[in-house]
Amino acid sequence: MQTIQLSVLPKEAVNNDFLEQKIAQALNIINFQFKITKRSIDARRKPVKINLKIEVYSDEEVIPQSITEKKYPNINSGKPVIVVGFGPAGMFAALKLIELGFKPIVIERGKQVKERRRDIADINKKHIVNPESNYCFGEGGAGTFSDGKLYTRSKKRGNVNDILITLVQHGAPEDILVDAYPHIGTNKLPNVVTAIRETILSNGGEIHFNTKLTDIIIKNKQVEGVVTQNGNKIVAKNVILATGHSARDIFYLLNDKGITIESKPFALGVRIEHPQKLIDSIQYHCDERSDYLPPASYKLVQQVKQRGVFSFCMCPGGVIAPCATAPGEIVTNGWSPSKRNNPYANSGIVVTIEEDDLSAYVNYGALAGLEFQKDIEQKAFIAAGNKGKIGQYAPAQRLMDFIKGKKSIDLPECSYTPGIVSANLHEILPKAVAIRLQEGFKSFGNKMRGYLTNEAIIVAVESRTSSPVKIPRDKETLQHPNIKGLYPCGEGAGYAGGIVSAAIDGQKCAETITN
């Protein structure tokens, strides 16, 4: 086997006859087979190129399969481990426990995917927020209905390829093993999540939906089990706490029980939306995007007044979604279908929150960031209500109007389904955030000519970039330093930042329990 790197035009990248000719010329060989193992877009200059990493084999060789299907043992009689939360961290913790012969007992406050769809439809159409079943809570966690981006920088933390292979085994497209920025799509993720559930159940694991954790049983600094909302007790010596960044009741519970938690840095800002055609023209240096290129994305970062202003969860051909987890708050996020074929591109643009911003919340201790976050989300809700729109209507402003500090007379079309109302976002966002966003947007306009336009709209607020609370754990055992058998895990505990890194952390916690 030999490896070759090719840089070709987009239409050439999908032409196997052309690629065969290029390989034959480059390696001076005739009879061979090949397999693309990595694909990325180079849009730094015109024309845009596709970079390919290709493995080349002789005619006699057997090309290795992309995945080897993982076999799971039946663990009906295995030692029980409680997994709280069925997002990426919880799902992959449960799968790893089964692999290692343990019986995962998963409790999830939300509903299965199929039932969860109705609650999400209610948020979008009826402005009804179910605190237990929404974009953040339910089978698959926030990832199920928020895009499925799988790119991660957490390669040193664990085996990224193992996560991707497991997803492919459960129905994700094999392209995620090849693309530099893999993505499944909100329309395909529910089937993948359902397949993972079936694997866990068919091999002896348990999953209890509509089952909310209300207490952790601790005796002599050792976990003994958990209590659920109906008063039921589940007994086990090990609990993986993978509840996600929006399960605020868990942070309150730990704080009330005197279990150490810590305030953690996070970021807050807005969602910005442009016509996708505009982003395509900027990024691909063209008037019309080639059919052989995906909708363009971007990644932006700038230091403004000693703080980072950066893009977060950029969604080409996507939709801005209402992600509140309680009535009386506005929270935005973004997602894309697998084809990324919606007419708009959106991204979070956020500013790092520091201790100075939390000076009015010091009495809340480790929960200061959480209370700050809540207040901003509630201000956004009230601002829309002041315009006569009660519900999940989001306050919004044209980009240039925001930079100039004036309210928009009217608003362009927007993908945010519940609806938007014109508001001056300077009256909602903390001053330290608004000022830095203004300067950050100007800088982004210099980096991407055409980005600064009043056809772009910003929607408030993007506030759930990560958890504002960290649950400490020992570096070696991954247990809480004061509670034996309690394993803080994933985004909610402060140890991950996306589907893949959360999944890796879930696996690590499961592996540590078995040692």
Image (cartoon, helix red, strand yellow):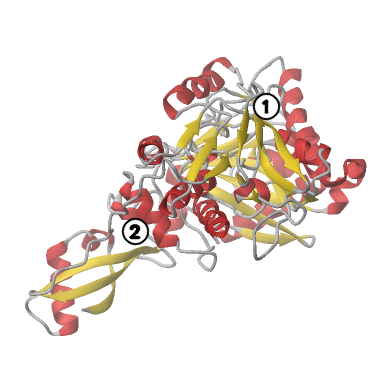
- What numbered label is drawn on residue 422? 1
- From the viewer's perspective, is 420 left or right of 33? right
- What numbered label is drawn on residue 198? none
Q: Quadrant of the C terminus?
A: bottom right
In the rendered view, would you say 509 is above or below 85?
below
Is residue 82 visible from the viewing direction of this image? yes
Kindly identify which residue carries mark 2.
Answer: 177
Front in this rendered view, residue 329 or 447:
329
Q: Residue at x 67, y 55 (%)?
A: 479
Q: Amino acid at mark 2?
A: Leu
Tags 2 and 1 touching, CB below 8 Å: no
Front in this rendered view, residue 164 or 410:
164
Front in this rendered view, residue 403 or 391:
391
Q: Amino acid at mark 1?
A: Ser
Q: Quadrant of the N terminus?
A: bottom left
Task: Answer with the quarter of the image where residue 22 lies.
Answer: bottom left
Single out the mark in the foreground, 2 or 1: 2
